[in-house]
Amino acid sequence: MDSAPVDSETLELLSRITGNKLEPQDVTPPLIFLSALIAILVGVMFVDGTVTTTEKQRWQQTIHKFISSQHSYRQLAQQITRGIQEHQIHRKSKYFFLLTDSLSLSERFLLVALGYEMSIADGKIDSREENYLTNIALELGIRAELLDVLESGINGDKQPTASALSEVRDLLSPSRFKAIEALFSKLPTL
């Protein structure tokens, strides 16, 4: 799929975030995923009131996992980051959930998992970061048992069930990410 079906409200939001007048054919699953990813990462960084150097480095590492250093899309990621901060998308759940409406459960779970990874960039998860991620995850339809799997890797005090572990493995199977597989080869040139 080269473009994602998008309603006018989401199209307007993505246009504001990127700083460009987008047409429906410009809106691809990778663009939507990238925008939602940056929104959740920015939200985690800012929710505790302090953005550390380590968090900034983790943000870069996470984005670089998806965009190679040779890709021109790093500039687009910077535009999206500025737009998300300027329009406070990470603080306005209505807008954040507009970005995630078309994502699969696997893509939503990946966003939350990457948010958890960001939350421990400075060595521990702040309670505000944990609350932010838990609230987002539950709104995205991610069950608490699946969050236990993520949290068990962070603080070890939760023991996820075997079925939850199995479901997380299935959700994160590479075969579930076909729409964003070529993540940034299908982003529009803005």
Image (spheres, rainbow, N blue to C red):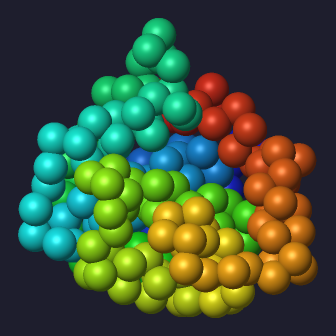
In front here: 17 or 129?
A: 129
Q: Position of residue 56 (x, y in %)?
A: 23, 42
The answer to whether residue 66 is seen in the rendering is: yes
In front here: 68 or 89?
A: 68
Q: Position of residue 47 (x, y in %)?
A: 21, 73
Q: Quadrant of residue 9?
A: bottom left
Residue occupying image coordinates x 54% and y 89%: 139
Q: Which quadrant holds the C terminus? A: top left
* Horizontal side, residue 1 vs residue 72: left or right: right
Residue occupying image coordinates x 23% and y 42%: 54
Residue occupying image coordinates x 32% and y 27%: 75
Q: Relative to 124, say whether 164 is above or below.
A: below
Q: Relative to 86, say whether 65 is above or below.
A: above
Q: Position of residue 5 (x, y in %)?
A: 67, 63
The answer to whether residue 98 is seen in the rendering is: no
* Horizontal side, residue 127 vs residue 68: left or right: left
Q: Residue furthest left?
A: 49
* Horizontal side, residue 61 vs residue 180: left or right: left
Q: Residue furthest front?
A: 157
In front here: 73 or 60?
A: 60
Q: Position of residue 106 (x, y in %)?
A: 74, 64
Q: Relative to 115, say whether 141 is above or below.
A: below
